[in-house]
Image: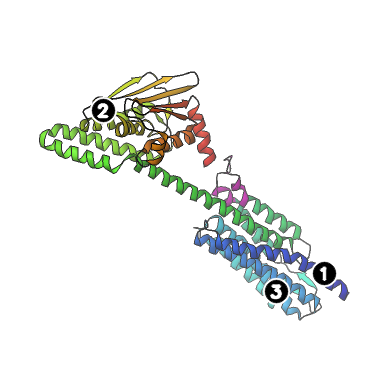
Amino acid sequence: MEILLTDDLRIMLMVIAPLLMELTGLIFIVQVDPYINKRHRRIMMVAILLVFSLIAQQVFESLTIIYSLDHIYRVVAAIYGYSVRPIIIVVFCHIVLQDRRFVLAWILIIINVAVYITALFSDIAFSISEEGHFQRGPLGFTCMVVSIILLIYLYVISLRSRDLRSVKRTEAWIPVANVLIIGAAVILDFGNYYDISFLTIAVVNTCVFFYIWLHLQFVREHEQMLEEQQRVKIMVSQIQPHFLYNTLSTIQALCRIDAEKASEITGKFGTYLRRNIDSLETEDLVPVETELEHTRVYAEIEMVRFPNIHIEYDIKDTDFKLPSLTIQPMVENAIRHGVRIREKGVITVSTARRLRYHEIIIADNGIGFTKKQAADDKGSHIGISNVTERIERMCGGTIEIDTHVGEGTTVIIHIPFDAEERHKSIMKSEN
């Protein structure tokens, strides 16, 4: 009999070893993961340490049997085991919704602990004889009942924490799967006694799964933050300091010679700034007419400063949408790097419906530029890379640039007919 117990201990240690290695590795990963915030990191560490203690409790309880220790040690170990299991579930609740206090859940925990502490002086929960025989009392299923209640609650808040109907957000099912794993382990442990319970193995693995879930959330939040920073960068790139200073100087000069004109330009300047700022608050496509109006406002401000510039519009197609700040940056580039030094600078903005796409053309008779000049002067040629990236990402459009030094530049933008459907699909996948 003694050899059998020794074999049981060896088997138990073989089961425990990979669990302990898994938890140890998880501690290191959680500590170095740059995406998890401090509060979530602390909660994860609490959950891991509780699972460590649960494994230690079960090892200790097994040793009390193997080495025939005083039965009171096994009683204390069992009390701890029954007490800590529901606590781990509540900690998982804090991982899913870290801003909640879960007062009712902790009241259930206190009741559960109080019930099992009675084993020190009563058999109402359970009793262990001096010979080591375990006997469940009338309240012996309190841990299981409390755990089931908390599991149902964890399941509910997990469902509400993420939109599970989203196609791409399959990670939203991770906390739900964790609940099902723990629930299955509780059922497997029911009425059976093992040195290491299924529940202990389950909570070790759910700790890993919850970490993966947190990591995916914070990586996505980090990506969204980068996108917001990119949007700010785009907006700032479209409101170059030179344009702000020059426009304000123009308004100041007009105030002395033509107050009415100064008031008009001030209004247009305010409209221009508001339109750029509004582009930060939405990732939706805008009607091409809205973008053309913004372009006209910008061009009219610049034509006050550069009377030699003339903007022509040939609009034959307005039944489509496109990313905001698409046409205006191209016109700005044409003015800054093309036509303003010409005796008569002309920019033509035209739209037309083609066989499979909507076409926008911005052509100028400016000085043009080479690819090397554009690469060496990225800060100045502000519109090209930003607009190209946004059109490709937001609606699957394309941009072609045909430029000849000394002759001018033509920018051709193609917006597919299904741009809105593509945009909705892209936004859904990113969210």
Q: Is residue 153 above or below residue 427?
A: below
Of the two numbered discs 2 and 1 in the rendering, the one whose residue sits closer to the viewer: 2
Magenta stretch containing residue 164, yes or no? yes
Q: Which residues are magenta?
A: 156-175
Q: Residues within 10 Å of mark 1 (few under 14, many from 20)?
A: some
| Magenta stretch, overall SS | helix
Alpha carbon separation for disc pair 2 and 1: 92 Å
Name the spot of residue 411 as percent of width and height, x first. 40, 27
Q: Secondary structure at mark 1?
A: helix
Name the spot of residue 5 as percent of width and height, x first. 84, 72
* Residue under pointer 3: 77
Q: Is residue 421 above or below residue 147?
A: above
| Residue name at image x 26 percent, y 28 percent | 342
Query: Are the two marked residues, 2 and 1, in contact with CB atoms closer than 8 angstroms?
Result: no
Judged left or right of residue 208, residue 345 is left
Residue extending farthest bottom: 70
Image quarter hosting the N terminus: bottom right
Mark yes or no: residue 280 visible.
Answer: no
Between disc 3 and disc 2, whose residue precedes? 3
Q: Secondary structure at mark 2?
A: loop
Residue extending farthest left: 257
Alpha carbon separation for disc pair 1 and 3: 19 Å
| Residue name at image x 10 percent, y 37 percent | 256
* Residue under pointer 1: 8
* Residue under pointer 2: 342
Q: Residues within 10 Å of mark 3 (few under 14, many from 20)?
A: many
User: Label 2 is placed on what type of residue?
Assistant: Arg
Judged left or right of residue 140, residue 171 is left
Q: Is residue 325 above or below residue 140?
A: above
Name the spot of residue 94 as percent of width and height, x first. 55, 59
Of the two numbered discs 3 and 2 in the rendering, the one whose residue sits closer to the viewer: 2
User: Label 1 is placed on what type of residue?
Assistant: Asp
